[in-house]
Each structure stands twice: as structure tokens, then as C-alpha cells.
Image (cartoon, rainbow, N blue to C red):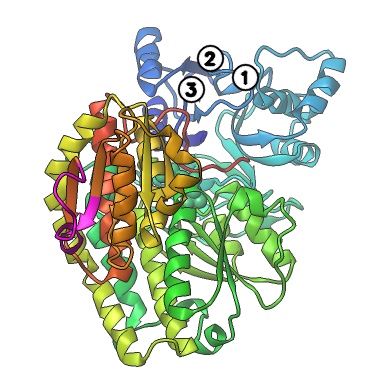
Amino acid sequence: MCGIVGYAGPRDCSEVLVSTLTNLEYRGYDSAGIAVFDEKNIIETVKSEGKLSNLKNKLETLGKPEGHIGIGHTRWATHGEPSDVNSHPHSAPRVTIVHNGIIENYQELKEFLTGKGKTFISETDTEVVAQLLDYYYDGDPITTIDKVMGEVTGSFALGIMFAEFPDRIYAVRRESPLIVGVADGESFIASDVTAILQYTKNYYLLEHDEIATLTRDSVSFVDKYLNPIEKELKVADWDREAAQKAGYPHFMIKEINEQPTAISTTVNPRIRGGLPNLDECGLTLDILKDLKSITVVACGTAMHAGMVGKYVIEDIARVPVNVDIASEFRYRNPIIGEGDLVIIISQSGETADSLAALRLSKQRGAKVLAIVNAKGSSIAREADMVIYTLAGPEIAVASTKAYITQISVMYLFAFELALAKGTVSTAECKRLTSALQKMPEAVKYVIESVDEICQYVGSKLITADSLLYIGRGLDYALSMEGSLKLKEVSYIHSESYAAGELKHGTISLIDDEMPVIAVATQSDLIEKTISNVVEVKSRGAKVILVCTDSCANKIKDGIADYKIIIPHIDELLMPITAVLPLQILAYYTSVNRGNNPDQPRNLAKSVTVE
Ligand code: M6R
């Protein structure tokens, strides 16, 4: 997703812009650029298709703009292919801008401006906004921005420089996130706070349609009626080190290794007297005991965390759970209303479809609980109740530690719900809670013990064109996540299938070129899953079996080509450890194929547009 940065202060602006853009690389992008007021107060723009290294080379070859105020951008192409000309910043005679998001009515505005004699050099919606700002420019940047905000529709964030005001930059947003950072004698804008952690932890959250003005030593805000406003200064509780690789070759493997800490940080503060306690968000036992059904809405990995939650909640709390993909839910006229609980799960808290699902649920009278990692994000702020996953910043596009904390919260929720419903005794709830608290040690052990075999199996998968993941029950919910992880970082096609569904069509795909990864951690389902493994094996598939040590004893030799064995723990909690070999396998397969697992092609970390 596009990343915006901006700087006003004493430092070399080009350097600050490039370093803050580097911190946003994880969001995914295909071109980058900067614009800086030079020593003569002229705006100099340098941009380049491809990675930031291309931009850096260009800055070295052409000479970087020397100045102290400027804006920068990493672009994830939507309108027009990745190219130098479509890269941001975009300029009109008196305005230069960077933009994240989508201007929905840009065609209409483009026709209007073309009729007024304006010409365009790029295919982007961004250039239309630059020209519109220039068209309405009345000598006052704030009233000009306000006029343009009244004309454009969509969800977007903008960083703006006006040629006549070389001492400042402006920022405005609608839906897409944007923060304003402050330090002594300098100020910043950024799409998220991780971009500026090396300079400051102090920041303001810009709200919809508010306009910020930043100079070296001041920041000021007006609301959408152009009244000056005071905003609450926030302090990021993520530090710079958390957003750096710390000696690991990639963020993905660093974040996999951070999972023990992520679980304990998320789980421990929510346990009192040996029992889960989610009072912090307003979920009391009284509210929980009246719940009739639950709908979980999310996208991608977060939706897969919801699937694990469904199996666990239905199993122990006996409350029906419907799990929905946010992009389907929002357009499906869902049956949601007063008395219903909708749980929105999101790492970024900014996913456009999940946010829309939240708003729709609230409109219809449902109560919304958000399970979110990014503090102060739109989903966290708009939900009725929030439980934060305390995973710290997740930089790799492929979600790992966020997923494990999302399912940890689903367990806490399920245990407390089961207690409220009386479907488990206090003693049983305490036993489950204590088992959950021991997960960090188990996770640490599994990460270390499966590394070598995952590396080896990963090396065998590099030539595969397509793979199948199978499992039953919780193992099926988990195999969905395993399959997504592999395909997003290795670019090998893969699907997950409920093992019992294979015979109803998909087994026709099986031959000796289609490896099958079978997850079998549930003892009551092991025989069924193994019979599906035998079926695919006899049709030529190479089988990789992920199973527990106790299940492994029940499986005859020769049934699987490779076994990845993990210790048997409470079976309800198995997804917490069984996901690890799937994550690690995806990681090594990606690396073995020469990919960068942190920035998979075509993907963005946070999908803030539809
Ligand atoms: O920020 P969110 O959790 O709302 O993001 C949802 C998905 O886009 C995300 O989980 C995506 O599927 C991950 N890249 C998968 O690893």
C-alpha cells in the first residue's frame, strides 16, 4: 500500500525522507519519490520506478535536493502502471503532492479540469488532485485544501506543498491513515508511526478531514469547519528496535521468533485469579452469558484466526459462530442486528473491507468487538469494545505473530464465554487458562526443534507448481493459514481443503507433481485424516505430514514422505504450536526460491482500499 512521509526541520530532508520511506517499505510498493524545497525555495522532485535502491541511485547520480522541508512517497500502483511518470510526488504549477488511497471521482474531475485547459502527464488519480488544488488555489492553502476536500470522494491521505509557502507542508486525510510526528524543532508526517520511530515517538493522529500545517517548530490543526483545534499528543509504545531486523535476515523469521513473547504479552495481563478476564473492554460475564450467536468478520490471516476461534468457541462454549470474509459480508445484506455481537479481527486496524463491515454492523444495531494490533487505528477507535493484541509492530507482509496473538485472544474469549455460559466448570477453565499461559515455552521449543526439518522440506518444495493442504476440524482451520502463508511468500499455488471433501472433486488434481501437506494433530480425527493421506499417496502425491508425537506413533511407516513432528499438548490449543512449522516452511520455501519473504510481489501490508 502507498506510504507517505514528510519532514520539516534542520536535518538533511532528502536523507530523512529516504530513511522514513525505508521504514515503510514493508507496506509494499513499486516506485518511490521525494520532493524537497531546495536552497532557492524551488521544489525539486526526484522519482523512480522500482525499489528504493533505484531512487537512491538516482539521487546519487543526479545529486540529491538540498533542503529542509519536503514530502516523499512509496507507490503501490492502482491507477496506471508502475513507471517513473506515474510515481509520486505529482505536481501542478503551484502545488506538489503525495497521496495514499483512491480518489473515486477522479475521471469526472479530470474531464472538468481538461475542459478548463489543464493537461495531464500521468494516468494517476493523484495528478488530478494536484491540478484541482492548483485550479482552486486562492493564496490560502487551508481554504484551498478545504475546497478540494469538498469536491473529491474516496478514501485517501495527502501530503501537500504549495510553491508559495516554502516553510511548511500540509496534511489531510479521509479514511486512509496519516499521523503527524513532533520532536524538538522538527515535525513529520507519515502513514504510520513506525516510519518515524528513529526520530520521535510523539505523534498526533489526524482525524477525517482535519488539516495539519507543519513547519520546523510548530504543528497546528483545523477541523473540517476550519476551526483551530488542540489535539491530544500520543506516545508510541513501540520502540525503534522492535521495528528493526535485529540481526535476523528477514522480518518474517524475526517475527516468527518473537511469537513466545507476543503470546505472553497478550495473554498474561488478561488473566486474574487463574481465569481469563476481559473486563478491560467491557465484556463482563453478564454480557457474555446472554450471547446467542457471534459473527467474526475479517480478511486473510485475520479471518483464519476467526476460523480457529469458531472451532474453539463452538466446541467449548456451545455458541454458534459464523465467520465471514469482510469483502463479502459488507455487500451481502448480512443478517445482523440488535443483540448480535460482531467481532472484527485486524492487525492493522485499517483494512478497508473490515472497517466497512464494522460500520455496517454498528448501523444495524450490533455491538462490535475489535481485536486489533495497531493502537489508535480506525477499527480500534470505531468499535464499541477493543481488545488489543500486543504483538508489537509487525513489519513483514506475511502475518505471523499477529495471527498467533489473534488466536490467543480468541482462546481467552472462548474460555471466558464458556465459563459465563456454564459449559465448563471453573476448575476446567482454570486448567485451560493455565495451559494457554504455558504456550510461550511450547512455542519456543517448537520453533527451535522444527527449524532444520522445515528447511529441508522447504528445499524439496522449490520446484512444485501447486500444493494442497488438508486437515479436519481445527487442523482444517489451521491448514487455511498454512496455505495462505506458503502462497503469499513462495508464489507456489496452494489450496487448503477439508480432508473429507477431497473425494468430492479435488482428488482429481492429485498426481506425483502435487505435494500434499496434511495436518493431523487431533487424536479423534487422526484415523480419518490418515485414510485421506493414504488416498493421495496411492495416487502419487508426495506427503508432508505435520503431526504430534502421540499421533505419529499411530501412523505406519511409509505413509508420509516427510514427517514434521511436534509435541502433543492440550488438543484444543494445538493450532498455537502447529502453525509454527507451516510458517517456517513457507519462510524457507520463499527464501530457497530466491524471493524476499518480507515484501512479496503485488502484496501490501495494509489494504486500505477496496
Ligand atoms: O491488517 P489486517 O489484519 O486487517 O489485514 C488482513 C489481511 O490483509 C492480512 O491478514 C493478510 O492476509 C496477510 N498479509 C496475510 O499474511
Q: How crowded is mark 3: few (under 14 residues within 10 Å), some or many (20 or more)?
A: many
Q: In this view, does 569 lie above or below 289?
A: above
44 shown above or below 516: above
Label 2's element?
loop
Between 119 and 569, the one nearer to me in the picture: 569
Secondary element at image label 3: strand
Amino acid marked by disc 3: Gly
Q: Which is more foreground, mark 1 or mark 3?
A: 1
User: Distance between the Cα atoms at labels 1 and 2?
Assistant: 8 Å
Of pointers 1 and 3, the one earlier in the residue sequence:
3
Instruction: Tell me the kind of residue under disc 1.
Output: Gly
Q: Relative to 244, is 393 above or below? A: below
Query: Disc 1 designates what residue?
Result: 80
In the drawing, what numbered circle is on residue 33? Answer: 3
Residue marked by disc 2: 83
Residue lying at the far right of the rendered structure: 115
Tell me which segment is drawn in magenta. Answer: 546-560
- At numbered mark 1, what does the secondary structure look like: helix, strand or loop? loop
Coordinates of residue 203 in the picture (x, y in percent): 46, 53
- Estimate the x, y position of residue 145 in percent, counting from the top left: 72, 38
